[in-house]
Image (spheres, rainbow, N blue to C red):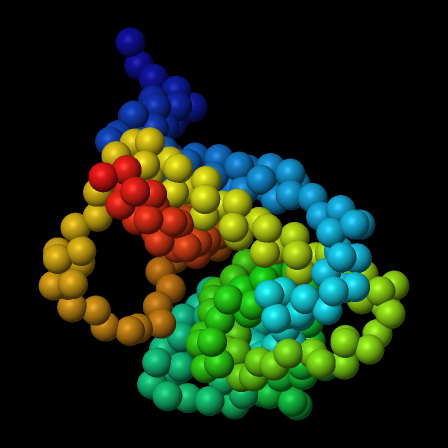
Amino acid sequence: MSLSFGETSFTFLLSINNSPEVKKYIEMWKDSYLSKMVMVDMFDSIKVSEEEAYSVYEQNDWKETPLELVNIAEVLTDSLDVIEIILKELSAGKDIRDLARQYTKRDSLKDRGGEFGYFPVTKHGEIGKAAFKMETGDVYGPLKLEEGYSVFQLIGKKTDTTNYSKSYEEIREELITHLTLIKFEKYVNEYNAKLAHKYGVEIYEDVLNEIENTYLNLVVVRYMGFGGEIFAVPYTEQFSGWYDIWLKSKDLAQ
């Protein structure tokens, strides 16, 4: 019995789908998408009441919940090849502003070297969220946005002292968003700590301390054919605060 071209292609695809390596990567990306769905559900479940926000405003409790301003320099591009160039140049000590003048697709910021100017961490979506957890000089990315791929460096951070004299109505949205981010990070870290305790996670710090690390900005892509490309492995959110919580709960249990 002979197979037609269509039948041969179908048989080939079935054999590829059943290969151990393809199954491994399918599971890896499935876990990644499921984790993102869980994170979205978690974020949507976080609520900040009007009373909570106003209480923070009224008590001037800014030391515990400061409204931070950040300034970044960014390169935004549609090409992962350009991202690879950017990361290599940054690792070699190139100024990100010079790279932005050459590569960024944000025309309004090109002459400014991709510099945003100071803005609240509650602005600019995922960029603001990431910048909130960074230290001056840190580089972040590539971050996938609707507009393309973003690599940026935090070049300044300060507390917005002008908000002390503003009315509640003026800062309400920013304050609620900021408190939501704080609650969300706390919730995720506590949730992960509980899972680590439940499933008996063990971390061998002596082994980790023996590993030699080299700081290198690097992005690896997988080519999909017909010009398509994706990251070689899923992007992982950086929530490491669970470790200290888990460690304390582990010590108490002992």
The vertical placement of 100 against 123, above or below, is: below
Q: Position of residue 99 (x, y in %)?
A: 51, 85
Give the residue at x 32% y 36%.
197
* 131 and 94: which is toward the camera: 131
Give the residue at x 52% y 78%.
154
* 154 and 165: which is toward the camera: 165
Q: Position of residue 243 (x, y in %)?
A: 34, 51
Res. 1 in view: yes
Relative to 83, is 43 on the left or the right? Answer: right
- Quadrant housing residue 250: top left
Q: Position of residue 245 (x, y in %)?
A: 38, 49
Give the residue at x 23% y 39%.
254
* 178 and 89: which is toward the camera: 178
* Quarter of the figure that contains the N terminus: top left
Relative to 89, is 177 on the left or the right? Answer: right
Res. 79 in view: no
Relative to 235, is 101 on the left or the right? Answer: right
Q: How many marks?
A: 0
